[in-house]
Amino acid sequence: MAVTGEKLVATAGMDAQPPPLLRRDEDARAAVADLVRRLGAERVLTHPAALFPYTYDASFNSEAHPGRPDCVVLPRDTQDVVTVMQVANRYHVPVVPRGSASAYSGGAVAHYGGIVVALNVLDRIIEIDADNLQVLCQPGVIHANLNDALAKYGMIFPPDPGSSKIASVGGMTANNSSGMRAVKYGPTLHYVLGIEVVLPTGEVVWTGGEGSKALQSVSGLNLTPLFIMSEGTLGVITQLRLRIIPKPESRGLVVARFDSLEDAAEMTRRIFRGGILPAALEIMDRSAIRAVNIFKPDLKLVECAAMLLVEADGSSAVVADTVGRIEQVARELATSVETATNPKEMESLWAGRAALGAASSLVVPGGTRVGMGEDICVPLKDMPATLRKIAEAAEKRQVAVVLYGHIGSGNVHSAIVVHHTPEEIERAKLLTEDIHALALEYRGTTSGEHGIGVVRRDYADAELGAAVTIMRQMQRSLDPNGIMNPGKKLPFADPAVVGT
Amino acid sequence: MAVTGEKLVATAGMDAQPPPLLRRDEDARAAVADLVRRLGAERVLTHPAALFPYTYDASFNSEAHPGRPDCVVLPRDTQDVVTVMQVANRYHVPVVPRGSASAYSGGAVAHYGGIVVALNVLDRIIEIDADNLQVLCQPGVIHANLNDALAKYGMIFPPDPGSSKIASVGGMTANNSSGMRAVKYGPTLHYVLGIEVVLPTGEVVWTGGEGSKALQSVSGLNLTPLFIMSEGTLGVITQLRLRIIPKPESRGLVVARFDSLEDAAEMTRRIFRGGILPAALEIMDRSAIRAVNIFKPDLKLVECAAMLLVEADGSSAVVADTVGRIEQVARELATSVETATNPKEMESLWAGRAALGAASSLVVPGGTRVGMGEDICVPLKDMPATLRKIAEAAEKRQVAVVLYGHIGSGNVHSAIVVHHTPEEIERAKLLTEDIHALALEYRGTTSGEHGIGVVRRDYADAELGAAVTIMRQMQRSLDPNGIMNPGKKLPFADPAVVGT
């Protein structure tokens, strides 16, 4: 079952270096046998058919090059995760934490074998303490389910990924998900008060205060955020204490259409300068509008260079006022403006944006969207140039691309659509590199929220500079044997240093 | 000038263990001489009169037991701070970063001698990039000055400490300040996109992306927050990239008076349950109202068991609506309600709360407020019991206490007022211990935002449990010689392990 030597897809030169933890087949076999003995066969999946669903995430990379684990552990509790760490350290076998695996980066895939910890089975909301504005839950709780449970208390957990119905809160934390409403509410980071984490050494600690129910504390060093967005490279999150806030009573939406990308960006600028902090601020360019019109012709979206969707939330009076102000800004620049404050109308206007994930594939008959180069962030004022240059690069590479994103945060979600032929995939890889190069040229980032995983790790030196050394030092300090999700997040290090 | 052996005030048993870095006089002399040689005498203060202002912060602890540094360095730039680190490592002398030293915790005081780095001299706003919602600045920039400079762009840096006119943004970051508006806008943590930090080894790294202008990024491990609230124990912050947001157009205020603390807490609960997220939510109990009436009799505050100040912000229409909704909740429970939406009225209503820092001392003729036990957080629903029990403990200890705080975050700012006699100070210490014990009993924290420094460090084990070991491990990894602000934040460790 060893996959250590397998050649992976070379997005961003990811196979340039050897893996940091050189897992050996005989060690892996011994580790699996030990886990079965300690946890019971029903908790340790080993049959190839049972392992198959764990060999990929939502990415093209893992579809093309699955990562087969030696086993999958279905933990009952924190103690089972401790057992996994003990066994992994004993036999020097990788541990790969996995939530819903809805990401595009390969972060939750065992590309180098080892033990996948299936945290989706730990899916209990332990306590909703609405009066103290917090919940205690397990990592496998699905985002939409948490918000459904909170609704009856009039509360929400604000981060709002497009994958709400499948993403787990543990995965959102490990990736620091943002979503559409981050422009107003910030990323997952802002809502994690503390976590229970099983460290690579098997120690269990609570960050943010052991047993604490405080909403703010400056006691100790700030460990919680170190694990947020660590993509399973520093430990396994087994419980989360999350901050919740009152649910806005209502929402309203302004849709504005523009003759140019520049006008759309200028509207964004004027919204902020006008003292307005919208709850969502999304852009779709002409390619995205066309994709939606193919997928949902009933929506009859008007084609234009760019469309902005700007949401306001709050009481109905607040929404009415904010929508009015947004509309006023829109009228200065847009070719047409529509507004909606009743849920049905809004749903219909949002439907286009919501459909984009699926719709993108349709711009190329028989093509598929590949999640590559799909998550750059650039400074807000460089959004128009970035979108234009991505479109130009796509034309040059002869690849279709659908462009949309969270313009309020400078986050571009480009959907590259290709047929699965070696030639087209090669062109998609080149376009991905073009997009990532653009992000760096504009002093942005290759990933705003989707994660680094295996597919973007080799940009770390260019993006982070000398800080990479410090990150490795932190990793080594917490994980002396280099067992945690090796080969993810940072470029491969010398195995002699990181591994065993 | 050595103070290593000096006995400090025993708040929270802080002298139970030996200091971690045993600085020797001859090493300190050699380090100072080396610094003078490298940086020039005009950048290295050594005269006792020049050092005096650096021997204390705003705390009673440092007033009673000043910490005299061996020298104070006035850095010109990042490179000067690197030089300090090189010298400190060479001679094994502590380095104490210092902003405005407006805190109560002794975090910026050189209780164990060594080199104070006076970061208040690095006070330049380097770039306001309003269109990209960020600023680049040095750590010594005063909070109020930053917001004054942002005002002409219609922007604000939202964290809002009571010490706005003296606190530096570097100190706010090192302590993770929250302030009155954290209930809506969150702590400083939420607004730091990246920092340039000189590590204890003298390396300079940018966190959050080298040269990045992205508003969100998940590239690399999340190092930025590790330095936020580290109180100078992990490095020296030399530049900050801060997120800014549109400035709310206007504000409105509701003042509600109650017959009982419980009614005030219930109003808080109903505000949140009603879907309202106010911009500030403050409580003053009877003792605080009395203190203000002594200090500013013109305000003629109505005495009552508790008074809430609830602020809304946004456009004028948003404020009008939100104030109306808050007022409606207030009328269900309050004995009287006042509202204000024009700045002059509001200022007069806020004046009482703003005066509290100074006013508290007046409740005891000839007495002084001592910043001890002044910053606990408890779960929101335990606020009434906590306030009542602090008042009872104060009565038992025969010490005057004035109670107010950020009820929306569960943060109680108790002002203990005593004469500076050994007996009264001893009683104040006992009351401080009572207050901290209450915080832990209610699963809160001994410090919500003011910092741990020397005065609260010995609660770390009780608050943080096994995580303390991990924090020490991080420290040791970044600071092998234990030079950074020793004796702060965490209990003393074995000098053989942390020091040299």
Image (spheres, coloured by chain):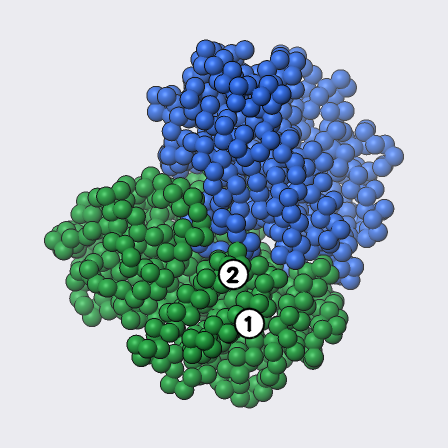
Chain colours: A blue, B green
Give percent across and percent down for residue B287. 53, 79
Task: Say which label, 2 or 1, has the lower sequence index.
Answer: 2
Left or right of residue A50, residue B477 in this image: left
Circle 2 sits on which residue?
B377
The local secondary structure at tag 1 comes to: helix
Q: Position of residue A430 (x, y in %)?
A: 57, 21
Q: Is residue A71 above or below residue A412?
A: above
Under mark 1, the amino acid is Arg
Q: Is residue B406 above or below residue A366?
A: below
- Where residue B223 appears, as percent x and y from the top left, is 44, 42
Residue A7 in sight from this viewpoint? no
Between marks 2 and 1 in the image, the one whose residue lies nearer the viewer: 1
What SS does tag 2 mark? strand
The reply, left or right, for residue B103 in relation to residue B70 is right
Q: Is residue B24 above or below residue A352?
A: below
Tell me if residue B443 can be seen: yes
Q: Which of the labelled discs sits on residue A64, or is there none? A: none
Q: Nearer the viewer, residue A23 or B175?
A: A23
Residue named by callout 1 = B388
Mark 2 surroundings: few (<14), some (14-19) or many (≥20) residues within 10 A: many
Quadrant location of the C terminus of chain B in the rendered image: top left
Seen at 37% across and 69% down, the residue is: B429
What chain is tagged by disc 1? B
Q: Quadrant of the N terminus of chain B?
A: bottom left
Q: CA distance from mark 2 to mark 1?
A: 15 Å
Q: Whole-percent x and y of residue B104?
A: 39, 66
Nearest the camera: A257 or B269? B269
> Relative to B351, is A63 on the left or the right?
right
Badge 1 crowding class, 10 Å Cα cut-off, few under 14, some 14 to 19, many 20 or more, is: some
Q: Residue at x 58, y 46 (%)?
A: A241
